[in-house]
Amino acid sequence: MAEVDSPRDITVPATAITVLSRLPSLDRLSAGKPVTSHTSALQSRTRVNEQDIGVAEDIELSEMSRPAASRSTTATSRVPLVQGPTPKQKRLLHIHFAAVCFSFFLMGWNDGATGPLLPTIQRFYKVDFAIVSLLFLSNSIGFIVGALSNIKLSDKIGFGKTFVAATIALIIGYTVQASGPPFPLFAIGYALNGWGLAIYNAQGNMYVTSMPNSAFRLGFAHASYGTGALVVPLAATQFAQMPRWQFYYLTSLGLALINCLLLILVFRFQRYEDLLGQTGQAPIEQSAASQGSIFKRMLTLKPMHTLAFWALVYTGTEVTIGGWINTYLQGLRGAGPSAGYVSSGFWGGLTIGRVAFIWVNRKFGERRVMHAYMLIAICLEITVWRIPSLLENAIAVSLVGLFLGPMYPIAMRSAGSTIPRSLLSGAIGWVAGFGQTGSALLPFLTGTLANKFGISSLQPLLVTVMAVALCLWALVPAGQERAD
């Protein structure tokens, strides 16, 4: 049968193509029937096309009247409803992330300085292990108060202003410490620093957790913390050997002033929700009722409390090693003041571990590798305890830092996947604040035990608490989709 050309003077809408494809072919309709003439076939085809076009146009009009999200896959509905961030928004996100990383660097700079300075502080103020341990306790009290006040401040004045307020507390604390005041005032400076660092920890972790590719970004942000703790012993060890050792805090004061200016220029005192919109991220929808009961809702989060106890033990272990290893090596291994560089090795290992093991975490699973990392760290710590070699101890301490490094970012990521996003800032602040009590309890307990049994009690204590951390991680629930 000869093929009949279709009329070419009719414009068929795009939607009609779908309808026409579902109609029976004219050839199939006329199969087995003689074609009387070219004209009759053309008229028949034209009537069919006109009917189809009418149906198609009706369908197209009905499609246009429906919301775009419910339309079928037509030419117009194929345009993405939610587009990704623009290049400008991506650049702004990178700037925000860089500002948070510098704040984390300052956190590490603060925490890594105590270890190399501790013997000098003891000699200057003529205090024993138990009294000098009060510095850790004072810092932790400030941290706990900061973590609790972060929930209220973040809701009242917003992300940008809260971040700057934390930096002002650091500026005041470093100013007090740089003046070489009496020991009680010196300890108050530690409390002010703890308050500011608690805000840094909560706000920074919350913001990075909400960013795209948060696993890598968290690892990099906490590597910035490790970098600060890595480089500060290089400076603090030099100041520790000078008569005016307290001038070290002038360098910390300078960094805090730079960070204050940076946070003002980058975040411009804006709220968290506004910053999310500027960087092309989905805003948080939160009802007025939920805003009034944030703390009450947080208390019902079992994953938050389990992570908080784990963070207490982990943070205490981390700060105890960094803060007391210098004293341990000088007391038992015959090291000199340059043993402060071993603290640098520990924090350096921590920094490398937080970046270098990201691919390992992804390949084998974050929950599984956490157990492996802690077991290896325990074995290494036992060698520091049992092998009386300064060189071996220094290498082993660095490797302990390497395997402890990835743990805290993994824990923060676990919080981001198990805690509702609307509660994430307060929950992370609580986990960090509660965890920071470990950074006071364990170093303080170390000082008390050292006062009674000698500094050799450090390693048995560390091995014990690391074993407790291993057991606590087994109780942390597996990550799941956030229930916002």
Image: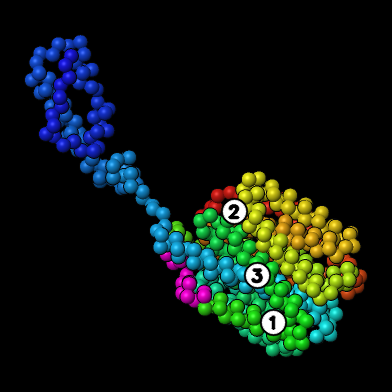
Q: Residues within 10 Å of mark 1 (few under 14, many from 20)?
A: many
Mark 2 falls on what kind of element?
A: helix
Reading the image, the residue beneath label 3 is 228
Q: Residues within 10 Å of mark 2 (few under 14, many from 20)?
A: many
Residue appearing at x 58%, y 49% in the figure:
480
The N terminus, quarter of image? top left
Reading the image, the residue beneath label 2 is 418
Reading the image, the residue beneath label 1 is 248
Q: Main secondary structure of the magenta part?
A: helix
- Over which residues does the magenta segment extend? 262-279
What's the amino acid at mark 3?
Gly
Q: Is residue 246 above or below residue 295?
A: below
The span from disc 2 to disc 1 (Cα, nearest Å) is 41 Å
Question: Closer to the camera, 173 or 142?
Answer: 173
**Does the rendering let one see residue 295?**
no
What's the amino acid at mark 1?
Tyr
> Which circle's residue, 2 or 1, is located before the other in the chain?
1
Residue appearing at x 17%, y 19% in the figure:
3
